[in-house]
Image (cartoon, helix red, strand yellow):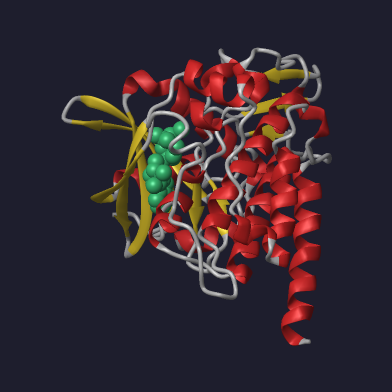
Amino acid sequence: MVALPYSLDSIPEGMTCTSGSGSGLPFLIQRTVARNIRLGDPIGTGRYGQVFVGHYQGETVAVKKFASRDEQSWVRETEIYSIVLLRHENILGYIASDMVSNSGVTELWLITQYHSNGSLYDYLSYNQIDCACMVQLMLSICNGLTHLHTELFGTQGKPAIAHRDMKSRNILVKANLTCCIADFGLAVMKVRQKNTMNLPTNPKQGTRRYMSPEILNDSINTLSFESFKQVDIYAVGLVMWEICRRTSSSTGQCEEYELPFQGMVPPDPTLDDMRTVVVDEKKQPPIPNRWTSDELLASMVELMRECWYPNPLARPTALYLKKKLLRLAMEDNKRSYA
Ligand code: ADP
Ligand code: MG
Ligand code: MG
């Protein structure tokens, strides 16, 4: 086993790569890491991959394996994670990508930091949270999304990126109870020089339950990159709703975990199911009475309703949400110390 000159834990903040491997390790080291990982238990499955715990020189990592038929999704995630300035505390930390041959079968691996709390969906299913934790979770999601959506200029720069599959299963909960955004298999980049987008085939590729009205009724303007950011914001509004249900008010009361539109559409809704509810009946997830009588939760209700505006242009940006949440967090702090 070849020892690395630095620990995997030290990659996020400390390292700048000059080898062209973007925010990951230099290519040769990526290979060395992949070849020397001992796979452990499966920790999650999604549409494209099965994710395992991996052990490397005493450190724990996550290994997402893609079948070779899902090569496109592996290529796209690797491409996104390799953007030099992508690294951010609220974006899943990337370590390496590699093709690994296992008994003659080629496997595509994506190696990232491991978060034992799992996805936000898992975390909310098993845990109630308090108001401070709610704000922290949301703020960290909006912080990550602001970074993703923002184009950075400069020698290296960073293109604006839209995620296109925002949902609680694609957000991970870190040990300090802040979140990081994961699963970039459907992400699109705005390529500045040509002012073109780097679009994967079909705009209806996200998770149907989280699809915005303009995707469901085909009115999305696919020529504008902003449209894809606005789609992310609609979905973030749904994630906020999932978080609020699990947030206990001063009385200690909260709702059971539910997926957005649970009970309004079947477990694996079709596009028609979603279109009927979201476009024809103009339904939004229900807001329990207790939220509107709690100052902080009531402010969250206002925010999520803005995210759900049927007119995508009227929705807030991720940066606006981040600033608003920061202000709410400060006000709440003041109230607790008053
Ligand atoms: P897919 O593209 O197939 O949807 P994801 O990247 O969303 O795959 O991963 C599927 C699931 O695996 C997630 O919902 C989460 O439960 C788990 N998972 C993924 N990456 C990690 C990680 N780094 N740490 C812990 N759990 C993870
Ligand atoms: Mg996923
Ligand atoms: Mg995916």
Placement of the C terminus among the 4 image quadrants? bottom right
Q: Is residue 156 above or below residue 3?
A: above
* x and y, in percent, of residue 324 in the image: 80, 56
**Residue at 69 percent of width and 46 percent of height:** 304
Direction bottom: furthest residue: 338
**Residue at 44 percent of width and 53 percent of height:** 257
- Visible residue check, residue 97: no
Q: Quadrant of ligand 1?
A: top left
Say which quarter of the image contains residue 80: top right
Say which quarter of the image contains residue 227: top right
Direction left: furthest residue: 103
Q: Is residue 218 left or right of residue 316?
A: left
Question: Quick one: 183 or 311, which is closer to the camera?
Answer: 311
Placement of the N terminus among the 4 image quadrants? bottom left
Q: Is residue 100 left or right of residue 210?
A: left
- Visible residue check, residue 162: yes
* x and y, in percent, of residue 34 in the image: 35, 44
Question: Quick one: 317 or 337, which is closer to the camera?
Answer: 337
* x and y, in percent, of residue 18 in the image: 63, 44
* x and y, in percent, of residue 163 in the image: 61, 34
Q: Is residue 115 left or right of residue 198?
A: left
Question: Quick one: 176 or 310, which is closer to the camera?
Answer: 310
Question: Quick one: 302 or 226, which is closer to the camera?
Answer: 302
